[in-house]
Amino acid sequence: MQKAGPSRATTAMRASSGGVAEDGASAEKPAAGRRRAGAVSDLGPLDGHLGYFIRRLQIWVFQDFIRTLSPLEISPAQFSVLSVINANEGLSQAELGNTLAIERARLVRLLNRLQKRRLIERLPSSADGRRHALRLTPTGQTTLKQAMALADTHEAGLRAKLGDAPYRALMEALRKL
Amino acid sequence: MQKAGPSRATTAMRASSGGVAEDGASAEKPAAGRRRAGAVSDLGPLDGHLGYFIRRLQIWVFQDFIRTLSPLEISPAQFSVLSVINANEGLSQAELGNTLAIERARLVRLLNRLQKRRLIERLPSSADGRRHALRLTPTGQTTLKQAMALADTHEAGLRAKLGDAPYRALMEALRKL
DNA sequence: GGGAATTGTTGTCCTAGTCAACAATACGAT
DNA sequence: ATCGTATTGTTGACTAGGACAACAATTCCC
């Protein structure tokens, strides 16, 4: 069948039986011999775990965000960075990283890309030679404005998906963490 | 300062002014010349966006899960896979992938590792030569049982963190997606 | 003045996610 | 029955994210 590799631990069994299989060891719980692969319903212990559903929702949110903002090519992380820089002009990379929980090394490369796109600048900090004072370029400001408009569209979609009351409840519950 | 690279677009400015800076172009919004980097408070447009908070919570959940399950070395994704296989013995990789929204190629490598650790088996499907019937080995079953116990601990911690009422509200709201 | 700490950077490693190609197998229609 | 099409599992390659160590420049603090 497939080329090779670390799978198919049962090749020997397979060769021994003719191929049609009288179900000596192969497991087949529901109706056997179906056609197409659809999803299976039972999540097992998983459906008692909130983390699983949060993860699924988070993936949906990111995909929708990326799709909605695709004309600008702004990722969620980039949007968060531009957003915080705009609200705190002149902050350092360390402050930005602490605010958004982005590690220093990761942030450097994120900012490199934004700087190459002329959306942000790294100015020398007036009082501390180690720091960079970050700020948006004019291009960055207009891009952020456009991004905010699209992000609002995305947010409306999310509120619609969740329902209005759960949306507000969630927002309130999560903000105080 | 730093070695080189695509940053420091403002090196020229820096060389021109003496170094102490009379604030010709460097931006410094709050109190200037602080000591240590702490986080900054204003998230800007970000704090109207639920996705941001969901992301933060999701990261916390994963980290806590990983830490709690670390004695077993079971990641969230691995736990979800074992969980669904256990609840649907003999299902195919395609079904598993559709259920958990894991892409085929990604799932192959996930299962390879679990198979190498003897936690799962790939049996030949009795009726379809293309499929593998997945199931847990006895080792996999006992490992999953232990994992479930630890995962319950994690879940209790999450419920405590969120508060009991928000936890239940969230669970109910997210389950129906 | 000098050791310790901070800041930004680079390099490296590992995991996730995505996409294209492919072989083996099954299906459907003629 | 056979041929084109679809499905399943697999591999390879690429990108992005996150984590960690090492490092130079700078600042802090005693």
Image (tube, coloured by chain):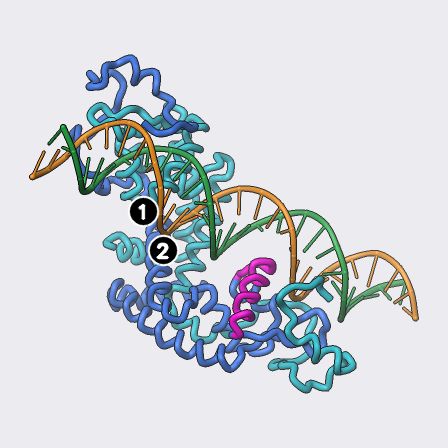
Chain colours: A cyan, B blue, C green, D orange
Q: Circle 1 sits in a helix, a strand or a loop, which is it? A: loop
Reply above or below: B45 against A1: above
- Image label count: 2
Q: Is residue A54 left or right of residue A4?
A: left
Q: Is residue B112 visible?
A: yes
Label 2, label 1: how far apart the Cα atoms are: 10 Å
Q: Which residue is mark 2?
A: B59
Q: Circle 2 sits in a helix, a strand or a loop, which is it? A: helix
Based on the displayed image, in which of its 4 quarters is residue A80 positioned? top left
Reply above or below: A158 against B75: above
Tell me the residue at 51%/64% (across/down).
Answer: B100
Q: Nearer the viewer, residue B86 or B20?
A: B20
| Disc 1 chain ID | A
Most distant residue in the top direction: B16
Most common secondary structure along the magenta stretch: helix
Based on the displayed image, in which of its 4 quarters is residue B21 positioned? top left
Check disc 2: other Cα within 10 Å, few if <14, some if 14-19, many if 20+.
Answer: some
Reply above or below: A146 against B46: above
Q: Amino acid at mark 1?
A: Ala
Q: Which residue is mark 1?
A: A101
Q: Is residue D3 left or right of residue A149?
A: right
Check disc 1: other Cα within 10 Å, few if <14, some if 14-19, many if 20+.
Answer: few
Tell me the residue at 45%/28% (across/down).
Answer: A117
The quadrant of the rendering that contains the C terminus of chain B is: bottom left
Tell me the residue at 40%/63% (across/down).
Answer: B174
Same-chain check, marks 2 and 1 = no
Q: Amino acid at mark 2?
A: Ile
Reply above or below: A150 against A28: above
Q: Nearer the viewer, residue D12 or B37?
A: D12
The quadrant of the rendering that contains the N terminus of chain B is: top left
Asked if the residues shown at circle 2 and circle 1 are in contact, with their CB atoms under 8 angstroms apart, the answer is yes
Tell me the residue at 37%/63% (across/down).
Answer: B66
